[in-house]
Image (spheres, helix red, strand yellow):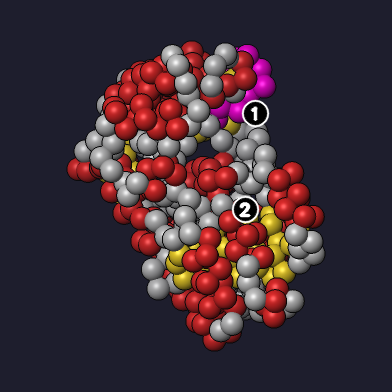
Amino acid sequence: MKIGFITSEYPPNNPGGAGISSKLIVDSLRDEGVDVDVYAIVGDEGSPELQDGIYKLPDQSHYPGPKTIGENISVFRHLPSLGEYDLLHAYNVRHLPGVVLRSSVPVISTMNNHTWISPDAEQHLREGLPQYDLPTIFRHSQTNGYTGIQAPIRSAIECVGKAVAKRVDHYTVQTEGMKTVMTRSGYDPEKIDVIPNILDERFRSDGISSERYILFVGQLYDHKGPLEVIRAFDALPRRLKDNWNLRIYGKGKLKSKIEAIISEKDLTQVSINYSSYRKLPEVYANAGLLVHASKYTEPFSRTWLEAMASGTPLVASRNPSSSDILKDVAKFYDPFDTQALTETLQEVLENQSMRESMARSGKHRVKRYTPEKIGRMYTDLYSRMIS
């Protein structure tokens, strides 16, 4: 069995969650005996090159327009003849239409983000995951700041790209919640398998953390909810703020705004930090609580796995994916209600036995997501598709 694995992120060029997940999947497939070639849209050159064991396609900066358009041009122009593969696997799927148009063999796509599903994932969750149609796409384009001729152009790109994406032979999603989202977006549920995200074993910890700091790990963008976490922490009773710190780990355009809030409110207990991925296991292992505050349906956040493996209890925003993966592990709150987050934090921080129970539940739950189990699920699907 020979597979072409095509992703828009791959370490060391992209050390974010999607890149890490890509490599973990590829490693687990190779451990199962699958012959895998990796094509990653991370190249600095204007033509494909083989480096570090992967084929690097030119990244989107070589082409005009948004990242989605650039990545599709790159794969369409620069992927080689693909007839030698039994199957192609597209991951982190901005580039999916280009793969479909180039491929002469079956294509499986892991829909690990909302591209070609819902162009405004936050608004989609806020509205209760309605059926996704053209009027909704157009309205969400407008709420995202597209005005005049931009809104119909943005809507047209979404509709055309989605029409091509729906020609894929089979899909995987990482939670039952994302299968629901895809189905309401017009995809055939009979063509969708649920294969979860995959644990990085380096995050396993023998103990259960008891240090008194609250952890936020993620990009500093609005849809990830860092501002809500800081505001909720600030609203906690003084006795808790005097005994707990909040450590924000991440980078992004909200950093200066977060620094301004910390200064304005004199929140000496709050800090902004950054850690390389290699050092993150220690950060998790020492945390007393992780807050995951996304305001959209996460496909399957790596931070959930990392916290559970580390023995770090979780407070999470409620959405179809988190409700599926973290049931009986995390304490949930409404992602659009900061007061609800404050109340949930207070409940958990005041109850050490609850935190210890949550940590134990997480350590037990994470056993479902080992590389061996997830790699076998992918290879079983591949075998079905090419038999």
Q: Nearer the viewer, residue 106 or 282?
A: 282
Mark 2 Cα-neighbour bin, 10 Å: few <14, some 14–19, many ≥20: many
Residues shaded magenta: 40-51
Q: Can you name the residue that lies furthest to the bottom here?
A: 353
Sequence-first tag of 1 and 2: 1
Relative height, residue 136 to residue 214 (above, below): above
Residue type at the position of mark 1: Gln
Q: Nearer the viewer, residue 131 or 324?
A: 131
The residue at the point 25 percent across, 40 percent down is 131
Image check: 122 left or right of 101? right
Q: Quadrant of the N terminus?
A: top left
The x and y percentages for residue 121 are: 42, 41
Relative height, residue 13 to residue 189 (above, below): above
Image check: 51 left or right of 305? right
- For label 1, the residue is 51
Tell me the mark number nearer the camera, choosing from 1 and 2. 2
What label sits on residue 312 in the rendered view?
none
Relative height, residue 156 to residue 387 (above, below): above
What label sits on residue 227 in the rendered view?
2
The residue at the point 72 percent across, 53 percent down is 261
Q: Nearer the viewer, residue 259 or 161?
A: 259
Q: CA distance from mark 1 to mark 2?
A: 39 Å
| Secondary-structure class at tag 1 | strand
